[in-house]
Amino acid sequence: MKILGKLIIIFWLMTIVSTPIRAELRWHWESSFSEDEKRRLTSWIEQTYHAITMSVAPYPFDVHIHFYRLADTTGPVPWANTRRSDPQGVNFHVDPNFSTSQFMNDWTAAHELSHLLLPYLGRDNSWYAEGFASFMQYQILHALNLLSKEAIDAEYQRRLDKAESNYTFDQLPFALAAKKLRAQRKYPTMYWGGAAYFLKVDQALRANGGSLLKTLQDYIECCRQNSSDLNTLTQDLDRISGMDTFSHELSVFQFQPGFPKYTPQP
Ligand SMILES: [Zn+2]
């Protein structure tokens, strides 16, 4: 009994140490910002974060937001990237002289925060990670009532058409070509070819009463904290959705030559 009691206490301590009481946003002001700038930037991220948690699920860990000032540029967020080793978060390089609505209509926060919904899958699978975040950025702007459903569908199509017209590896499957696209710095082509994977998966799930966002909700709750690679993630998503859509489409992207074909349903 004594040993059992100790084991129970150790297990309980491990549980409370490894699980935050409530996952939160954590703020890091890496440059000097006025109180008003901090308030506006905080509000922008909080609204985007809230839209993601309502559309998908609460993050199971604290998300650390680092702000850097980068003035005299042509947009509110000239550069941003994720921090994937613990603690996870996003670096935002921002020009706070842009208006609140210009920040809200910029897709960067939705894109970068969405990256953190999936585990880091390695450099070779960046087409998958970037495709996912590119798909999600407009879903979240739609959830924020900043873009209509028609507008995001039109934007997906415009981006896919442009990516396809810039794709020059017709003999290669997209997952292989993605490495060359990255080396050639053809990032939009890599991002939006990758987004076609998620558009196709979402379409197939919707035809069976589900959706990508619903599948992700269960994934975040059961599996996001597990270490993962692309195959394990794909198996988890297939199992959760009760379909083999994720693995089927992955094999298409890995083995079928040419730019991925996505046909929107009316
Ligand atoms: Zn990205």
Image: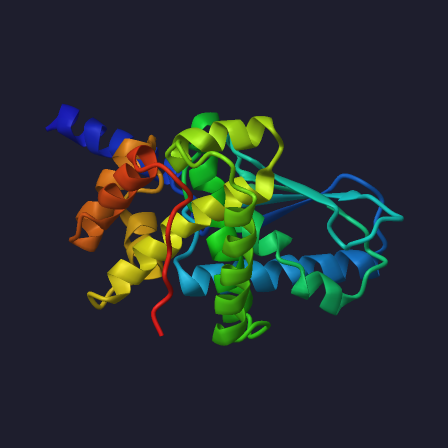
Q: Where is residue 194 in the image (x, y as percent from the top left)?
A: 44, 44
Residue 169 horizontal side relative to residue 141, left or right:
left
Which residue is painted at 15% across and 26% down in the image? Answer: 2
Image quadrant in which the N terminus is located: top left
Residue 18 horizontal side relative to residue 136, left or right:
left
Where on the image, by quarter, is ligand 1? top right
Residue 150 seen: yes
Determine the residue located farthest toward the right in the rendered image: 72
Say above or below: 95 vs 232. Answer: below
Q: Position of residue 87 (x, y in %)?
A: 53, 34
Determine the residue located farthest toward the left in the rendered image: 1
Which residue is painted at 72% across and 57% down in the image? Answer: 41
Q: Which of 112 and 218 is in front in this view?
A: 112
Say above or below: 146 vs 41. Answer: below
Residue 213 horizontal side relative to residue 49, left or right:
left
Q: Which of 42 and 216 is in front in this view?
A: 216
Q: Position of residue 228 (x, y in %)?
A: 33, 32
